[in-house]
Amino acid sequence: MNPTVTIIVLNWNGKDLTLSCLESLSKVTYQNASVLLVDNGSSDGSIEAIKEKFPQVDILGLDKNYGYAGGNNRGYQSISENSTDFVCFLNNDTEVAPNFIDKLVDASKKLGNNNLFGPKIYYAGNPGVIWYAGGIVKLPLRIYHRGIRKADSEEFSKVIQTDYVTGCCLFTSWETINNLKGFDESFGMYSEDVDLCLRAKKLGLKSYFIPSARVWHKVSASLGGAFTFKKILRRLKSNLRLIKKYGYTN
């Protein structure tokens, strides 16, 4: 039997984006996958709309907005290793290729179940242009996506080991995320994914970019655009926290 996969989608007042994401996920071809929608205390009727359109989706309704790290942590903690082999944390502002879970599961079989894996991610508004093809960490100054804003090409079509997997779509075993005690909730927003992968590396685990798994990201839709002041400020605060925690990297 194929391993079980739980796709965790986090929502906070993003009803329309989430419904679009769930519509995409309804076409997933992997036969042993389920979706858990974690709602961070939405007030826009998200839960009611999701129940009506996607009654097969499990919903974990939280009492307030716990942010990216807190919401996803409560999501994976609500299930157990006996219930699922793998978890895939997926932003609600994404759409996926139907076979993206198949490709990530195949990669885990070849490269090691307890490592971390991320797909090739394109801009949804420009679907041939790369948003993520691996993550590079060079503290204190730079944390960035390999291939960002470049046209897709053979260069970005090879499996590589990478510094981090973006939390936009991060796939790993339930055992791994549990052993890592989930995302560090002190970050608030941004860099939780980098921190998770750096902690995993300390335990001898690896992060991989899997180009055959494909996702399209409606970049920063929840914050109003790719270069808002709010986003820049939050990224700066998160990067400072990473520097304080890890110092310098090569």
Image (cartoon, rainbow, N blue to C red):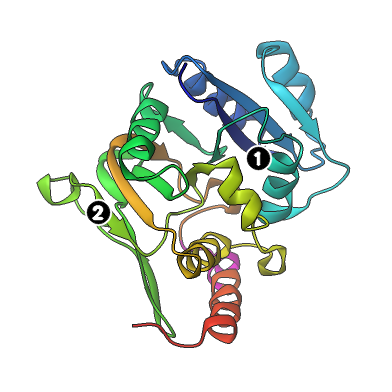
For the residue marked with disc 2, what is the amino acid? Answer: Ile
Q: Which secondary structure dominates the residues rendered in magenta? A: helix
Residue annotated with mark 2: 160
Estimate how packed mark 1 is, as few (under 14), some (14 to 19) or many (20 or more) residues with alpha carbons within 10 Å. many
* Mark closest to the chain's N terminus, 1 or 2: 1
Residue depicted at x 53% and y 46%: 221
- In this view of the protein, can residue 124 be seen by the observer? no
Residue depicted at x 25% and y 45%: 129
Estimate how packed mark 2 is, as few (under 14), some (14 to 19) or many (20 or more) residues with alpha carbons within 10 Å. some
Question: Quarter of the image holding residue 54?
Answer: top right
Q: Position of residue 133 (x, y in %)?
A: 29, 52
Q: What are the residue bounds of the magenta stretch? A: 227-232
Residue annotated with mark 1: 10
Does the magenta portion include 231?
Answer: yes
- Callouts 1 and 2 close, C-beta under 8 Å: no
Mark 1: which secondary structure? strand
Residue depicted at x 61% and y 30%: 84
